[in-house]
Amino acid sequence: MADTKDQIRELLATYERSLNTSDADLAASSYTPDGIFMPTTLPTVTGTNMADGYRQIFEAIRLDVTFTIDELVVTGQDTAYALTRSNGTQTLLATGDESAESNREIFLFHRTDTDGWKIARYMFNKPA
């Protein structure tokens, strides 16, 4: 189980890097082919539209965030979930305005024999 959790932690680190480098293709590659991304205040993005959805986000903002894993549970041989927090800064590219960025996230993961662990579902919101 430790190896599985390490693989998922590595996937989350890759996803974090994709956000901090505005790399839409890397972000999309972190998902299963039928993955679903449910961002707060933006439309849901699915499957083959994933890279385009992230490109639209990265055209508007630049992120510098760090994820903290609060809970990582392997629920089966090929399923797991994580509850995380992210904190850092967000820069609006149109104005250069920088603000604090803070979210609570839930990730659902799926493992396949060909792709290993990937994000199957991802949703976040702002803490109250």
Image (cartoon, grey):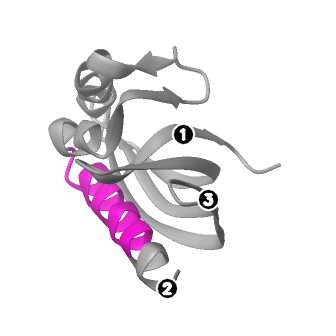
Q: Which residue is mark 2?
A: 2
The kind of residue tagged 2 is Ala
Q: Which mark is residue 122?
A: 1
Q: CA distance from mark 3 to mark 1?
A: 18 Å
Q: CA distance from mark 2 to mark 1?
A: 22 Å
Is residue 110 found left or right of 27 in the rendered image? right
Q: Percent position (x, y) of residue 67?
A: 49, 67
Q: In which image quadrant can residue 73 be found?
A: bottom right
Q: Which residue is mark 3?
A: 76
Q: Percent position (x, y) of residue 43?
A: 51, 14
The kind of residue tagged 3 is Gly
Which residues make up the magenta segment? 7-22
Of 42 and 11, which appears nearest the observer? 11
Depth-wise, is mark 2 or mark 3 nearer the camera? 3
Report the residue at 69% width, 44% height from top.
126
Report the residue at 31% width, 25% height from top.
50
Q: Percent position (x, y) of residue 69?
A: 59, 72
